[in-house]
C-alpha cells in the first residue's frame, strides 16, 4: 500500500481506538509535528460520519417503502386512522 | 423488519398521539428509533429487558423530548447519549452533504459507497466484503476500501465546510 493509504489505516486505528498506549503516544506526536496530518484526520472523521449518514438515509427510504406497503393493508391502515382520529 | 414494523408501530403511534404529535411525526420518529435499534443490535450494545415494542417506544419518547426540547420549558426526560449522538451526527453530515458532497456519489460511484457502508456501517468483515464485491482477497478489499475513503476525503476537501475550517 502506498504511504497515504498506510497513513489512513493508521489514522483509522487511532480514531477507532485500536492502538496500544505506546502507538497512541507516537501517533499523537506525529499529529502535532507532521504538516497536514491533523487536517487529514479531521477529514477522515467527517468521511465516516458521511458514510453513516448516507447509510441511514438509505435505511429510511427502505422504511418508507415498508410503511407504504403496510398502509395498503386495510386493517393496519384503519387502526392508525383510529389512533389519530 | 416488516414484522417489527407491523407489531410496534401502532403502539408507538399511540404514544406519539398522547404526546401531542401527528401521524407524520410518529412515522419519522419511529423510523429514527428503528435505525438506532438496528445499529445497537449490530454493534452488540443492545440490552433489552422488555419487549422490542417497549424498547422502541422508550427511544421514541426520548427522541420526541430531544426534538422538542427547545420548545419546552423543562425537559421531562433526558435523552440518552446514543440518541443525542444520532441527531448531532446526522446534523453535521447533512451539512456536509449540502456543502456539495453529493458530487462524491456521482464521481466515485455507487460501488465505492456500498463498499464503505458495508464495512463502516454494516460492520461486515473484510473477508465477507471480499467475497461480496468479488475481490481476490481480504487484503485487496482493504486496499480498495482505503482508496474509496481517500476519494471521499478528497471530495470533502472541496466542500465549503473544509474552506471554513482550514482556511
Image (cartoon, helix red, strand yellow):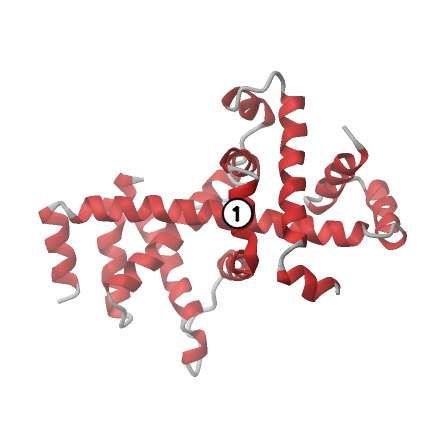
Image side of residue B127 versus residue A75, left or right: right
Q: Quadrant of residue B163?
A: bottom right
| Front residue (pair B156, B41) | B156
What number of labels is visible?
A: 1
Instruction: Please report the residue visible at 28 percent of the width from the left and 65 percent of the height from the top.
Output: B16
Q: Quadrant of the C terminus of chain A?
A: bottom left
Q: x, y percentage for residue B81?
A: 54, 59
Q: Secondary structure at mark 1?
A: helix
Q: Which residue is mark 1?
A: A52
Residue B73: x %, y % from top left: 43, 83
Q: Is residue A14 left or right of residue B100?
A: right
Tell which residue pokes out farthest to the bottom in this image. B73
> In the displayed structure, does residue B76 sit left or right of residue A7?
left
Q: Residues within 10 Å of mark 1 (few under 14, many from 20)?
A: many
Q: Position of residue B37 (x, y in %)?
A: 42, 47
Picture layout, residue B51 above or below residue B89: above
Quarter placement of the N terminus of chain A: top right
Closer-to-camera residue (B33/B143): B143
Q: Position of residue A33 (x, y in %)?
A: 90, 52
Residue at left offset 58%, top offset 22%: B127
**Could you tell me which chain the residue with mark 1 belongs to?**
A
Amino acid at each position: 500500500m502506498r504511504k497515504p493509504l498506510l497513513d489512513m489505516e493508521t489514522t483509522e486505528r487511532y480514531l477507532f481506538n485500536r492502538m496500544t498506549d505506546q502507538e497512541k503516544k507516537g501517533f499523537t506526536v506525529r499529529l502535532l509535528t507532521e504538516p497536514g496530518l491533523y487536517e487529514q484526520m479531521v477529514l477522515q472523521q467527517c468521511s465516516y460520519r458521511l458514510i453513516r449518514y448516507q447509510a441511514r438515509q438509505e435505511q429510511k427510504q427502505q422504511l418508507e417503502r415498508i410503511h407504504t406497503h403496510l398502509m395498503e393493508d386495510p386493517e393496519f391502515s384503519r387502526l392508525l386512522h383510529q389512533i389519530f382520529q | 423488519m416488516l414484522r417489527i414494523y407491523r407489531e410496534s408501530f401502532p403502539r408507538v403511534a399511540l404514544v406519539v398521539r398522547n404526546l401531542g404529535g401527528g401521524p407524520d411525526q410518529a412515522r419519522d420518529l419511529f423510523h429514527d428509533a428503528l435505525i438506532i435499534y438496528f445499529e445497537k443490535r449490530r454493534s452488540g450494545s443492545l440490552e433489552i429487558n422488555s419487549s422490542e415494542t417497549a424498547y422502541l417506544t422508550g427511544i421514541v419518547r426520548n427522541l420526541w423530548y430531544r426534538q422538542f426540547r427547545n420548545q419546552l420549558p423543562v425537559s421531562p426526560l433526558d435523552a440518552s447519549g446514543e440518541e443525542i449522538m444520532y441527531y448531532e451526527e446526522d446534523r453535521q453530515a447533512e451539512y456536509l452533504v449540502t456543502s456539495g458532497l453529493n458530487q462524491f456519489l456521482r464521481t466515485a460511484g455507487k460501488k465505492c459507497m456500498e463498499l464503505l457502508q458495508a464495512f463502516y456501517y454494516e460492520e461486515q468483515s473484510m473477508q465477507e466484503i471480499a467475497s461480496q464485491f468479488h475481490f481476490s482477497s481480504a487484503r485487496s478489499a482493504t486496499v480498495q476500501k482505503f482508496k474509496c475513503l481517500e476519494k471521499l476525503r478528497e471530495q470533502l476537501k472541496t466542500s465549503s465546510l473544509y474552506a471554513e475550517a482550514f482556511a
